[in-house]
Amino acid sequence: MAPGQVRATTMTSRTAPASSGARGAIGQTVGVRSTWLRLPAVAVVVALGVAACTSTKPPAGATTTPNPPTSAEDSSTARSALASSLPPLPSSSGVAGSPTSVAGGAQPPTPSQLPHIDEASLQAFYTQQLAWKSCSGGYQCAQLKVPFDYAKPSGVALELSVVREQTGVKSKLGSVVLNPGGPGGSGVQYARAAAPIIGLQLGGKFDIVGFDPRGVGESAPVRCLSAKELDQWVAFEADPTSSREIAQQDVLAKGFAAGCGAKSGVLLAHVSTVDTARDLDVLRAALGDPKLSYIGASYGTFLGAIYAQLFPTHVRALVLDGALDPSSSAADLDHTQAKGFEVALQSYIASCVSHGNCPLGTSTAGAEPQLDRWLAVVKATPIRASNGRVLTQALAVGGIAAALYAPTSWGDLTAALVSAFKGDPSRLLELSDQIDGRQSNGTYDNLVESNSAINCVDRPGLGPTIADYAREAIAGDKDGPTFGEFIGWGNVACAEWPVAPELAPGPVSAVGAPPILVIGTLRDPATPYVGAQALAKQLGGSLLTFDGDGHTAFLRSTCVDNVVKSYVVALKTPAVGTICK
């Protein structure tokens, strides 16, 4: 999720076959986030700097030699030690929020202004051999070495976790790399869940590869807060008209940013999508593929677009499903996403009412007002579950948003609302936990933290103070009564971020690339269809439209799946104006 406040994360449930335990065209759901949404309380999760590393010695767990790792176990230990031992940010780091707050006071570049990459200085990385080892589930795992700072490729190296499912087909066409979105979604976890169905869908012609981007999952994860602190962070949403609550939000935002700076140090300056796009090209080379085949969902479309901008001649086939518009500002993305969730909510309401026994009543016109009245009650009097957890308004809206990612979750939302209206919020809390990466034992993966870290360096925020975010939340009211204000808070953490943004909004281009396939879903809540239209136009790509509800389209429509297979395997693009159902 990028800027939106529906949880700083952009969670998305990608699809996979019933046999793999994932959801999709065949049925279930892989609970992997993929979009831009904002975190509760003002973060921006499934949400995700220019400050240079000033330390003269590498952080613990990193290495100054770009040779491939010799042991998966050794590199795993190094990864876990890296983020916690990085030196603090230099005091001269820029302050995020202002479009001009980059090193030296210059405005950050737009995608088309990104500097040329001198691959000659990176040959030690490009020529590395991945040391694959068998790992659980019949997969193979390895660590990819990439420069910690691409401006200093001979310095510290990071190790990124990579997993693959090998095909046994002799006529293999190469590898397909996956990204499930977020930013902050684990490509390793997603590949483990979805590789079997995607490999089958592509006719067994490719190895299916997933990786955790820098700052995410097993790849030097960004850390900021304790589990107890994250509980407070995701559960709070300030009334933007209340000076007292705005002040509380400001304290929380400052605490979040300070925690990230203290626990993750200079890593925060090196987790941008530009860095990850460069990592993706190093991975392509290490896999032995002369050109990249890639399927990116939600935020993964932004990563794919930046890759196409930087490496157009290295593209073989890019599938960008549930697209974001790189030229949109943080505020524009907030407004677009809020409207998308409102459209999705109306689709859910129509279905709920038509099936009868809907907790929101029998009138489609009266259902959302009834829901909003209940949310106002929860705002004033949060509901305590039997296990002691409390459902706040922010968590309730987050749970509703989570269920709107897939029509297959609408029944779960109805059941959760029925229970919550009766005083039992446990089911709605479970839905909310999905979007925050909160585990049943109360711990969190690093989705919330990495989402904010990546989003805050990927584009300027709404301004340098909490007041700028409060104004945006108030402006969000016009986007819809349920989600407008919530998403309008956006990445409030960016108002206090210790690292300056590295990129400014602007169109991408892919001059020299072959046709790129962009997919848009007409009633996508997290990445509305207008983003796919804009991205396809910028890339000169082929736009495939899915006339459906929910987030992303691949593995949810036989028609879409067939188009993707034809494109990835045979490089055939669909006819102009193709619409799938």
Image (cartoon, helix red, strand yellow):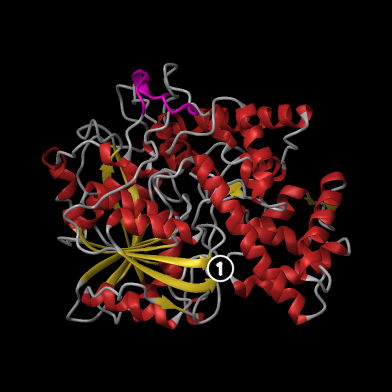
398 or 560, nearer to the observer: 560
Q: Quadrant of residue 141?
A: bottom left
58 or 325, nearer to the observer: 325
Is residue 430 found left or right of 558 in the rendered image? right
Is residue 240 found left or right of 498 in the rendered image? right
Is residue 399 found left or right of 281 in the rendered image? right
Residue 89, compared with residue 437, is above or below; it is: above
Q: Position of residue 316 (x, y in %)?
A: 21, 64
Is residue 357 found left or right of 118 in the rendered image? right
Residue at (83% x, 67% y) in the render: 419
Residue at (76% x, 32% y) in the render: 245
Q: Position of residue 108 (x, y in %)?
A: 35, 30
Magenta residues, start to end: 96-107
Residue at (62% x, 62% y) in the render: 343
484 or 306, nearer to the observer: 484
* Mark 1 element type: loop
167 or 34, nearer to the observer: 34
Mark 1, Cα crowd under 10 Å, few <14 / some 14-19 / many 20+, is many
Instruction: Please state the total of marks drawn on the protein image.
Output: 1
Q: Is residue 322 visible?
A: yes
Residue 58, compared with residue 394, is above or below; it is: above
**Is 102 a magenta residue?**
yes
Amino acid type of the residue tagged 1 in the rendering:
Gly
- Residue on which disc 1 sits: 550
Q: Position of residue 572 (x, y in %)?
A: 24, 75
Q: Is residue 485 visible?
A: no
**Is 308 a magenta residue?**
no
Q: Position of residue 95 (x, y in %)?
A: 48, 23
